[in-house]
Amino acid sequence: MNVLQNIYDNSPVFFQHIMTSVKGYQNTKNRFGRIYYEHREFLRDFDNWTLERKCEYQRKELIKFVRYAYENSSFYHELYKDIDIYSIENIDDLKKLPIVDKEMLRSSIEDVYTVNKKDALEGHTGGTTGKSLVVLMTREDMMKRMATLDHFKSKVGFENLKMRRATFNGKHIVPQNQRCKIFWRYNAACKQMIFSSFHITEENMKYYVDELNKFKPQALDGFFTSMCDIAGYIERHNIKLSFKPVAIFPTSETLTAEGRARLERVFDCKVYDQYASSEGAPFVVECQNQVLHIDLSTGVFEKFNADSNEVLVTSFTTHGTPLIRYRIGDSMIFADTEEVCNCGNNQPIVKKIEGRKLDFLYNAEGAKINSGNVSNLFKNIPNAIIRAQLVQDRMDEVTILLEIDKKIYKKEYDMLLLNEFEHKFGKNTRAIIKHVDEIPRAKSGKFQMIRNNIEVK
């Protein structure tokens, strides 16, 4: 445990609010600078372009990005050594380039990077296979990604930094030794109340609802299942809300029709879906008609092959850790090219996002620990895990199977993982770590990071 985390965990709640806000103000410097505001202006202009002009912009950005990766990343320089990189002149030409998967990146990550760690922002991802990656992002790319996200939200009425929002995420904001029923901390920098997703039990949910009514957020965002659980509690107990959000923006998990309907019914506002990733994938966002559109300014999506809906991504905002024809592991169903939405957005339509499964585990108290939080268990173990699987046969115990890179993995990583597990699952849930040569796949041939063998209630 680092010094700041130790100070935080042993401080009174009011001081934890202050520390949360201080961290928030530090983050704003990396996310909301001059480039952020310039890109917001660009995106407002981009909305009014013809589809042909947008596609031409995408083509030119692709050429620049591929050449940048070839010239600045030793991994891509070696990968493309037998390819005439200057023959890549349009989207179809991407097929001349090899596909890159997560294991290729993980095993060669130092060669993939184009920037020094001291000059970059670090991102940590566990992913649906439990494969740990540390990606480096330039501040310019981070600001452009935040601008894209906030532009999407502004088009349906929510303006980040100016309006209050409630966020349900995987931050460790509630120390294990806390006794009071305060499961949220305030980030004044973003007018954001952060709610813990680890303590949402039937006993605790009334405290969450009371705080929501007190805070009166103008938007909700974060883990879909966490917000659905809160909405279900409100509906079961016929609780009256004293606020009406502008919108709800789920992240990290695939939406279900039932869950979307429940959120819209309970909070009396629309839910708007989005797709990106911690690695930095291009964006897919919903318009005011709740139709998914690819944002052509952010990158390229391709089908992995004709027989599946799995996608490859090339993202223009990954200069620190370039993603080109990257097999991210998610699937999408694209609409026919002639299909048009009457919202005014002329960019391609995605009929369905099939990735980001709604898998979860339980802690000993019965709270659901969703896939977003589970995958984050591995975020602090840099590039040393090839594959991980978590198996639960009883409420108070989880077995963690690890395929590791023996050249990189250190013994102390087990303790690091156990500490992260305790933060997410609590002290009453036991973790058993087992190092194995190979984790078996399901009968379907697919790999499952989560295997919950407890009967779902």
Image (spheres, rainbow, N blue to C red):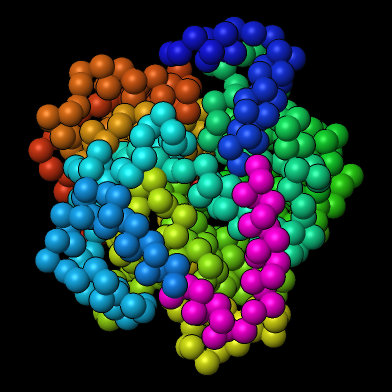
Total label count?
0
Residue 325: x %, y % from top left: 30, 64
Question: Can you see residue 30?
Answer: yes
Residue 402 as seen in the image, left or right of residue 321: left
Q: Estimate the x, y position of residue 297 in percent, counting from the top left.
A: 53, 67
Q: In which quarter of the image is the N terminus?
A: top left
Q: Which residue is drawn at 22% across and 74% down?
A: 96
Which quadrant of the figure has residue 4? top right
Looking at the image, the residue that sits furthest to the bottom is: 338
Q: What stretch is highlighted in magenta?
A: 32-59
Q: Which quarter of the figure has residue 291?
A: bottom right
Tell me, yes or no, whether the highlighted magenta stretch contains residue 316.
no
Q: Where is residue 132 in the image (x, y as percent from the top left)?
A: 31, 39
Q: Residue at x 87, y 47 (%)?
A: 243
The answer to whether residue 343 is above or below residue 211 is below
Main SS of residues in magenta: helix
Q: Vertically, is 344 above or below 37?
A: below
Return the x and y of residue 101 as percentages of the image width and height.
24, 56
